[in-house]
Amino acid sequence: MKICRTCKVEKSDEDFKGRQVDCKDCMRKRRSRGHHSIGAVIADIYRGQIARSRQRGHDLPDYNLIWLRDWLKGQPLFSILYNKWVDADFDKWEKPSVDRIDDYKGYTKDNIQLMSWRENSDKAKEDRVTGKNNKASRAVVGTDKDGVDHYFHSMHEAERRTGALALNISNICNGVRGKTAKGYKWRYADEHEVKNEE
C-alpha cells in the first residue's frame, strides 16, 4: 500500500504503475487534460483528415475545425467513445474516429460517421472482403467451360468462390503461366465490366 502524491489516497500497489508516485487514475486524469483532452482529440482528427485528403487526391473537407467540433460534441456517441478510450488507458483502438461512409469520396458533411478506431479498421477489412472497397484489389473474370463469364471483385474472392489459388489466378492474368485454373480461364476485368458491377 502507498499514498498517491496527487489524490492523497492510500491505495494498493496494483493501483500504481511501477514506481510511479501517482496512482493510475490520477495519471489518466492528468493525461486527459493535455494532449488527450477532447479538444486535442478533435484537432487531431481534423488534422488527419486534411493530411489523408491530400494523400488520396481528394478535395479538402467541406467543413472547418469549428464545424467538426460542434458536430462531434452534438453526437451522444462521442462522449461514450471518448470516456471508453480514457477508461481503456488511451488504447488507440478505442479512440474516437471519424470514418467516411463512402470510401471513394472525401470528407464531407454528409459522408462522415463516428466510430472507434477498432470499428473503423474492422469496417475497412470487411469492405475489402465484400468488394465494397475495391481500391486495393483488382477485379478478375473467370470464364467457365460453357463460355460464361463470372465476375469477381478480387482474386481472393475468386479463390474463395472457385477454389483456384489467388497466386495462380494472378500468374494467369499476368501471362506468367497457363490460361486456366480450376476449370476457369482467367483475365483481369476491364473498366467497363468494373463499372457495370458498381
Image (cartoon, rainbow, N blue to C red):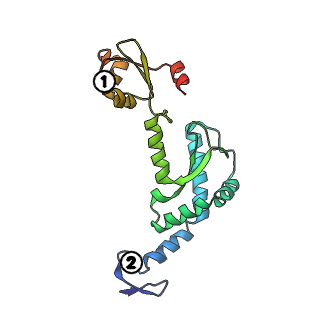
- Amino acid residing under circle 2: Phe
Q: Secondary structure at mark 2?
A: loop
- Pointer 1: residues within 10 angstroms few (<14), some, or many (20+)? many
Identity of the residue furthest to the front in this view: 146
- Kindly indicate the quadrant of the structure image that contains residue 100: top right
Sooner in the amino-acid sequence: mark 1 or mark 2:
2
Residue at position x 48%, y 33% in the image: 134
Please give the residue where the numbered disc 1 appears in the rendered image.
168
* Contact (Cβ within 8 Å) of mark 1 with mark 2: no
Q: Which mark is residue 11?
A: none
Q: Secondary structure at mark 1?
A: helix
- Kindly indicate the quadrant of the structure image that contains residue 14: bottom left
- Amino acid residing under circle 1: Asn
Q: x and y percent of residue 66 in the render?
A: 70, 56
Please give the residue where the numbered disc 2 appears in the rendered image.
16
Query: In front here: 59 or 140?
Result: 140
